[in-house]
Image (cartoon, rainbow, N blue to C red):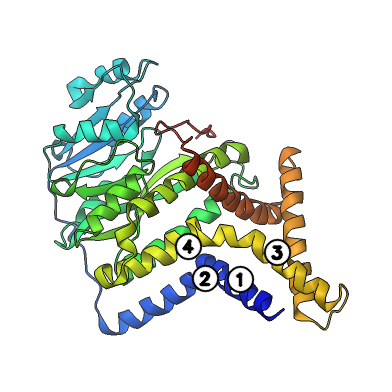
Amino acid sequence: MLWVEIFFWVLLFIVFYAYLGYGILLYLLVRIKRLFVKPFTPDPSYEPEVTLFVAAYNEKDFVDAKVQNALELDYPQEKIRQIWVTDGSNDGTPELLAKYAHLGVEVYHKPERGGKIGAMNRGMAFVKTPIVIFSDGNTLLGRESVRRIVSLFSNPKVGCVSGEKRIFDKDKDTAAGTEGIYWKYESKLKKWDAELYSVVGAAGELFAIRTNLFTEVEKDTLLDDFIISLRVAMKGFTIQYDPEAYAIETSSANVKEELKRKIRIAAGGIQSVIRLKSLLNPFKYSILSFQYVSHRVLRWTLAPISLPIIFLLNATLWLDAGMFNFSNLYTWLFYLQLAFYLMAALGWYLENKAIKIKVLFVPYYFLMMNYAVLMGIRRYFKGSQSVNWERAKRGTL
C-alpha cells in the first residue's frame, strides 16, 4: 500500500496547490518583494489616443447601452476611437451601429462569419492608435476603466493590461451566482500575480495591448484573449492588472449555461497549453513560467484529472484500514470526501428545484468547473469544439 499512499498524497498536493496553495505562496512572495522593491506608480496624466475595439456577433440588444457607455467614459472623447467588427451578424447589429456614425463609431462588416478571432485579426488593420482596448459587446465598462488601464502603460515595460470581470447577479444565491465568488478569488490572485511580475492571461471582457505588439492569431484559436496577452508577455513585456478597471456582465442564466461556457474555455485551455508549450520552459521565461504553470496549467491539466483518482485511491486506503477505523487518517479523509461529493450532489438537486442554499452551491460549482475541464479536454482532442462562440444565455442587468 505504500505506493498507493505516495500517489494519493502527491495528487492531493497538486489539487491543493492548484486551487489554494499557490495563492498562499504568491501572497508570501509578494510580501517579501514589498520589503525590497517599491511598486510602480502609474501616471494618471498619460493620455494617448486609444481604440475601443469590439468584435461583435448578433449583439443588437446591447448596442445602444454599449455605445452610450463608451461616450460616458472618463477620458477625452477626442482621443477615443470606437471600432466594431460585426462579421456574420444577421440580427441588425451593423445597421443599428450605423446610426452612431456621426459620433465616430466605425463599423466593419462582412456577411461571412469567421469567429471572434477572425474578426479581431481583420479589424486590427483599421487600428491606428498606439493602444487598443478590447471589450465584449455585452459588457459595460466602469467610468474610469479606460483611464486606469491607459495609465499603466506609462510604464514602458508594460505591454498588456487586463481589467477585471465583474459579475452582476440579482440571484446571488444560485449556483451560477457562485461564479461571482470565483471571480473575486481570481481577482485577488491576478493582483498578486501582477505585483510579483505579470498576470498570466487577460480577461476578454476587458484588456488592452500596445498595438504594435499584436500579431495575428491562428484562425482556430479558442481563447484569443489568453493567447494574445501571453504572447505579448513572451516578448519580454509584462501583463498588468487593475481591479478598478472593470467590465460588468451578468452571470450565466443557470449552471447548464455556465457549464457550456466553461467546457469551451477548458478546450481552449488545453489548446493554449499545447500552442504555448515553450512557455513551460523556466530556463527561458523564468518567473513567468512559474506563474503560468501554477495558476493556469495545473488547473487545466493535472488538478481535474487528479480528483477522481484521489477518491479511488482514498477508497482503497479506507478499505485497507477498516471502514470504521476512525483512528486512521484515511478513514476521516474518505468520509470528508464523501460528504463533499454528497453536498455537491445535493446542490445540483436543489439548483434544479430552484431551492437556494448557498453553502451547497460552492462544492457543486467547484466540481462543475472541474467536470467542464475534463469535458473540454475530451472535446478538444476529438476536434469537436468550434471556433465560433455558442453563446451562453445570461441573466439581465
User: Disc 2 and disc 3: Cα gap in Å?
Assistant: 17 Å
**Dot placed on the residue nearer the N-terminal end, 4 or 3:** 4
Instruction: Give the side of residue 370 with respect to residue 294, left or right.
Output: right
- The reply to whether the C-beta atoms of the residues labelled 2 and 3 are less than 8 Å apart is no
| Distance of label 4 from label 1 (alpha carbons) | 12 Å
Q: SS class of the residue under badge 4?
A: helix
Q: Within 10 angstroms of label 1, few (less than 14), some, or many (20 or more) residues?
A: some
Marker disc for residue 298:
4
Label disc, if present, on residue 12 of the rendered structure: 1
Q: Please name the residue that numbered disc 2 is placed on.
A: 17
Calculate the distance from the C-alpha at mark 1 to the C-alpha at mark 3: 10 Å
> Which quarter of the figure is the N terminus placed in?
bottom right
* Marks 1 and 3, the one that precedes in the sequence: 1
Rounded to the nearest angstrom, the CA distance separating label 1 from label 2 is 8 Å
Which comes sooner in the sequence, label 1 or label 2?
A: 1
What amino acid is labelled 1 in the image? Leu
304 is higher (above) or lower (below) than 313: above
- Element under disc 1: helix
Mark drawn on residue 311: 3
Please give the name of the residue rendered at 39% of the width and 41% of the height, measured from the top-left corner: 222
Q: Is residue 238 above or below residue 142?
A: below
Return the disc, 2 or 3, that comes first in the chain's sequence.
Answer: 2
Q: Are marks 4 and 2 in contact (CB under 8 Å)?
A: yes
Residue kind at label 4, given as amino acid type: Leu
